[in-house]
Image (spheres, grey):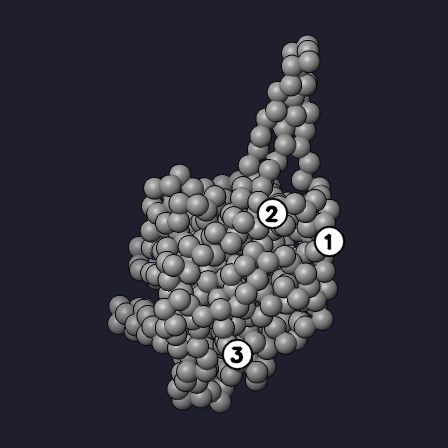
Amino acid sequence: MKTILIDGTWQDAQSKDLIDVLDPATGCVFTELSRGQKEDVDQAVVAARHAFKNEWGALSAIERGRLLIKVRDAVLERADEIAAVESKDTGKPLHLAKKDISALARYFEFYGSAADKHHGEVIPYLNGYNVNVVHEPLGVTAHIIPWNYPSQVFGRTVCPALAAGNAVVVKPSEEACQSVLLIARIAEEAGLPAGALNIVTGFGAEAGEALAKHPDINLLTFTGSPAVGTRVQQATAENHVRCVLELGGKSPQVVFEDADLDKAVPAVVAGFIQNTGQTCSAGTRLLVQRSVYQSVVERVAKRVADVKAGMPDSGADCGPIITADQFKRVQAFIARVKASGLEVLAQGQLDNVDEGGFFVPPIVFGPVPRMHELALEEVFGPVLAVIPFDDEQDAIELANGTDYGLVAGVWTENGSRQLRMANAIEVGQVFINCYGAGGGVELPFGGVKKSGYGREKGFLAMDEFTTTKTIVNHY
Ligand code: NAD
């Protein structure tokens, strides 16, 4: 099957080379992708620029919005099929993939509805002047997408970009992008004009790098690892191209002694095992007030012992790790932590898994010293570090004590403390007595520090994908 979409035509890479894609639940090759490279990226950017200046750019905001709503309807009609494809491709449990596709449909709905509501303003100025501030599309936006949430990251970056009137070039992950390809086909069938959405599959170091370096893109949005984030940021800086980075995290869940543990403990466990820990916002540091450390650890351990890692369609809580390399990385990380002498507080179960699959049952370590690698570095696997703290000030210092700043959870019944903690924690999103809260298409999302910058989700994303022009009229 052809996996490159340029100007409405599915095609092979110009080189005709292919990339093998593994099924993470078995370790076997299950499909192939075209190995797009610079020349394919160049063609895609030309097609996007042409669409932006012609058919796509000629549509009104109302028309663009209606088209996105049509795609939403088509996505909902085929939601089970897209979810099955994403589950097979990424290894994530089918029940989780279904939630992701609901979120995808909601992105099309939210931004389809937002397209004609991103108003400008009139500024009162000197007598004799009429000043209008308008939001204009940027032109061609480039989207580099990771493997952990292919359809969700597609939805949260591509939908606002299209709603704002940009034409788009997507470089999905070579590890998992079957759902993205299907969504693109569905969008085309629903009537998205040729060239508005272009896709180039390929390796990051080839197609991804070519896209990031391209001088004729107007914005690059990148979701992925901090290391690659630095590279793409450097590449876009060469051309003064705007860059939105959504990178990693080491998110804290802060549990105070007055927390409702019946609420906190299930959310803490769900927060670190989701998508087998391969979630940028996973709550992978459990910071617990010393007075309740023992009881929290016992409750968490009891719950984690029941967690099952199994085949994606088995109803298990976790699937496999996505790739052979990532599997080795996570295993090596766990081995190093064990070798450092840390106690394993709990471990989940493997449930009838294929021997070739990349399965890692969830594991909990504690008490983890504050400067230990596990307390500071993202594992991107189902590994929880439990760290005790003394008081509120100590909790704040610990919560802010990594290079990351994406998301935090705070569990306390004390209203003043809730506010103080929300203000003091350096992250893009703070959840009080909840965590994740259903994904929140409506809620602005993004990081501070090494978790990146720029905001996705919510109405704010319409600002991210537009430029503001001030028009001063002297009459
Ligand atoms: P990755 O950085 O290896 O790859 C992400 C994307 O970048 C892929 O499409 C890849 O092909 C491409 N890429 C790789 N090298 C490139 C290069 N030199 N130039 C341009 N593109 C290149 O990340 P991953 O392993 O797919 O994802 C895991 C990481 O992503 C984790 O660190 C995780 O925390 C982060 N992540 C962050 C968010 C967020 O919103 N903050 C969401 C999901 C994942």
Label 2, label 3: how far apart the Cα atoms are: 38 Å
Element marked by disc 2: loop
Residue 88: mark in rendering: 3
Image coordinates for residue 134, horizontal then vertical, percent: 63, 32
The reply to whether the C-beta atoms of the residues labelled 3 and 1 are less than 8 Å apart is no
Viewer-proximal residue among 305 and 435: 435
Which quadrant, please, contains the C terminus? top right
Of callouts 3 and 1, which one flags the residue occurring earlier in the amino acid sequence? 1
The reply to whether the C-beta atoms of the residues labelled 1 and 2 are less than 8 Å apart is no
Viewer-proximal residue among 241 and 473: 473
* Displayed quadrant of residue 156: bottom right
Reading the image, the residue beneath label 2 is: 54
Q: Is mark 1 within 8 Å of ligand 1?
A: no
Describe residue 314's horizontal placement relative to residue 174 as left or right: right
Who's the residue at 70% across and 44% down the image?
A: 60
Image coordinates for residue 372, horizontal then vertical, percent: 31, 59
Query: Label 3 sits on what residue type?
Result: Lys
Element marked by disc 1: helix
Label 3, label 1: how far apart the Cα atoms are: 31 Å
Who's the residue at 54% across and 65% down the image?
A: 9
Image coordinates for residue 175, horizontal then vertical, percent: 43, 70
Residue extending furthest top?
127
Reading the image, the residue beneath label 1 is: 66
Query: Label 1 sits on what residue type?
Result: Arg
Query: Label 2 sits on what residue type?
Result: Asn
